[in-house]
Image (tube, rainbow, N blue to C red):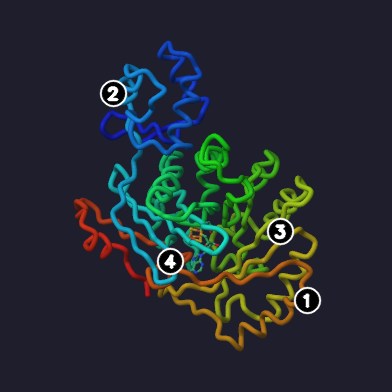
Amino acid sequence: MERTVIDNKENLIGYSREELRRLFQEWGEPAFRGDQVYKWLYNKGAVSFDEMSNLPKTLREQLAAHFRLGALTLIAREVSADGTEKYLWELRDGHRMESVLIPEERRTTLCISSQVGCALACAFCATGKMGFLRHLTTGEIVEQVLAAQRLSDHTITNVVFMGMGEPFLNYNRVIQAARILGDPEGLAIANRRITISTSGIVPAIRRFARDKEPYGLAISLHSPFQHIRQQIMPIAETFDLRDLLDSAREYVSQWRHKRITFEYVLLKGVNDRPEDARELIRLLSPLRAKLNLIPYNDCDLGFEAPDDARLNRFLEPLMRAPFTVTVRKNRGNDISAACGQLYVKVMKNERTPRSRKKSVDKIIPLK
Ligand code: SAH
Ligand code: SF4
């Protein structure tokens, strides 16, 4: 597994339990030291090797000589009027990415990134406009949760891979991160409360199904018609609707009760007609599905959200759908923290001013 190495010190965050055990064995130490460090990293959220009080001092020093603890620097934190918070992180190589914390009455969700930018260029998505810059490492993924938990007063109960990037194009690192997040001796977030959202990378969905990964799966559908879907999501040309639904079937057939969530950003005149609703019912009824309608967050990309009259005409047939239909609440709009608004301008060859105000300016407000 490759990791970011900048100052010759590798980031220890991201190491799996097995990797830690192996590390200590290579150092001629008992493997259980790996278990101890694993707990310090993920369960106790240690920020220094000094804290690891059940390790001999020499071992703590050896760790500190070889490793760093963490690779994210917080450069901006914005709090929305509704309590949503956005964190802008700088990585060791100067790239930036974001996480969004959404506190609700009975749960707090952290929306995390899996890549810097995204190669898939969906027409309605601001992150897509950045292009692909790089994958995040397992450590950079896990640390978003560790660091947000440290910063926030809310206990993070749910994690969704709905920030920047396509998690299924960074499959191994994302799954390794999910393992650590879901491990009772790691961050101890219930597996079913970790959800991976994909634009429809069919081979990865099949692998996820066959491996019986215990995490939730969300598929960004956005149209029940192939010709429309491929107009707004170029990846649909590679993995077509029929294959996608077939892979979704494979996923639900692996489980007795699990449902699959289909995400659907409502775009006026594109996918909000009653016939879209009727076709959705036809396609999704045979599956154990949930449909999550997402209000389009305007990012100046040439789309509009439907007005109330159109929305009601679209929703009408869906009232009789044999599956659950939910409409996502629009949160954090005043800080551009809502889905699809995550867009960080990466300034090449420019040192980042660390003051909060200047950094915030670099989040392009897309409204
Ligand atoms: N790449 C993955 C996960 C990140 S995007 C995916 O596409 O599923 C998370 C969700 O935000 C997706 O459902 C995506 O379609 C949605 N999204 C993107 N742009 C949006 C916008 N402008 N308004 C509302 N939702 C958007
Ligand atoms: Fe990438 Fe998802 Fe945005 Fe599409 S919607 S460009 S897959 S992040």
Circle on res. 83: 4
The residues tagged by marks 3 and 2 sit, at their Cα atoms, a distance apart of 53 Å
Q: Quadrant of residue 27?
A: top left
**Is disc 3's CB within 8 Å of ligand 1?**
no
Q: Are marks 3 and 4 in contact (CB under 8 Å)?
A: no
Of circles 4 and 1, the one toward us is 4
**Three-letter amino acid code of the residue under disc 1:** Arg
- Amino acid carrying label 3: it is Arg
* Residue 46 image position (x, y, % from top left): 39, 36
**Residue 200, quarter of the rendered image:** bottom right
Q: Which residue is mark 2?
A: 65
Which residue is at a point 37% across and 69% down the rendered structure image? 335
How many other residues sit within 10 Å of disc 4, few (<14), some (14-19) or many (≥20)? some
Q: Is residue 102 left or right of 76 when viewed as pictured?
A: right
Local SS, label 1: loop
Residue drawn at point x = 24 percent, y = 53 percent: 348
- The type of residue carrying mark 4 is Gly
Q: Nearer the viewer, mark 1 or mark 3?
A: 1
Badge 1: residue crowd in 10 Å (few <14, some 14–19, many ≥20):
few
As drawn, is 235 to the left or to the right of 129? Answer: right
**What is the number of the mark on residue 242?**
3
Percent of width and height locating residue 291 = 67, 66
